[in-house]
Amino acid sequence: MRGVSAIVTDRLVRRYGRRTGIEDLSLRVDEGQLFGFLGPNGAGKTTTIRVLLGFLRPTEGQATLFGLDCWRDTRRIKQDVGYLPGDLRLYSAMTGRDLLSTFGMIRRRDLTAPGRDLADRFSLDMGVPVRKMSRGMRQKLGLILALAHEPRLLILDEPTASLDPLMQEELIGYLRRLASQGHTIFFSSHTLSEVERLCDRIAVVREGRLVADEPLEQIRARAQRQFTIRWATEAVQAKVEPPGFLQVDQRRGRTWEGNLTGKAIDLVRWAAKQPIEDLSIGHPDLESLFRRYYDQSVVEARHPEAGGS
């Protein structure tokens, strides 16, 4: 099965009676990819994951993992998959070691050594019963149980929830190392900043439909950047006409503030010829880009004539 795409969905549909969970969803995730699956709560992310894991049968279309049908071959698929659900629930009376041993018996593998290494990495005492663990500790335990068997595909639903910032960085670094070794990470979240820190490709789902699927760098290239220019004198700035790639939203004394709609290098070259005292360019504003893209995509899905020819 090596060389086969880790995840493929083709016109996937899942309905709950009259309600649609996902509609006409087509995705392809390559092996070794850090893939972000982004969307607001209720967008269809969890439904998609449950279909991929064989928990739900597609109403229409097809979903495969490593070339195997997610519904018919679900038992075989699960040998190569690790999963952390967004609503993680664990047996409260069991300790981390108990659960690791149970998972090992289910998977017919001794997970003691890799589980111990992961517990050290995430600073978790595996001897504590689940009922005495904080939310952050339970989240760490869920990650250990999902990772201990070294899955080819790791499906994570809101994995950094309840983790402190240092542990989030530890997890992201570990996931990057896994991807560099050929493991595939499917990272589902409703928070763009979380996905942006890790993933190299992002798909966006809204109201069950796919509204974007492209490399992160292409998305960054389209996103606007905020800029601030401080001119040498107030009189000078009053005589300058902004170039087409600058949207000046505010002029206060010697200062211009607004959005850069072109490339940063264009602004730098233009600014080098101007009587400017200072210039700052912010990071790409992905949040604003995605909010606009969500809204326009939903309008076009409901009213195709709104998108033009």
Image (spheres, helix red, strand yellow):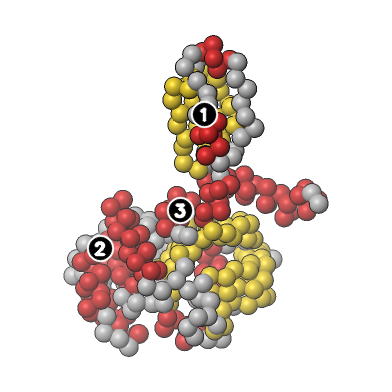
Could you tell me which residue is drawn at 54 percent across and 59 percent down? 215
Could you tell me which residue is drawn at 48 percent across and 74 percent down? 31
Q: Is residue 12 above or below residue 308?
A: below
Residue identifier under label 1 = 271
- 30 and 110: which one is in front? 30
Could you tell me which residue is drawn at 21 percent across and 62 percent down? 123
**Three-letter code, disc 2:** Phe
Residue identifier under label 3 = 196
> Can you tell which quarter of the image residue 132 is in?
bottom left
Determine whether the residue tagged by mark 1 lies in a helix, strand or loop. Answer: helix
Could you tell me which residue is drawn at 29 percent across and 67 percent down? 141
- 186 and 71: which one is in front? 186
Residue identifier under label 2 = 122
Marks 1 & 2, CB-CB < 8 Å contact: no
Percent from the top left, x then y, of residue 165? 31, 50
Specify whether 288 is left or right of 147. Answer: right
- In the image as oriented, which residue stretches furthest toward the top? 235
**Three-letter code, disc 1:** Ala
**Three-letter code, disc 3:** Glu
Q: Residues within 10 Å of mark 1 (few under 14, many from 20)?
A: some
Query: How many numbered badges does the structure rendering display?
Result: 3
Q: CA distance from mark 1 to mark 2?
A: 47 Å
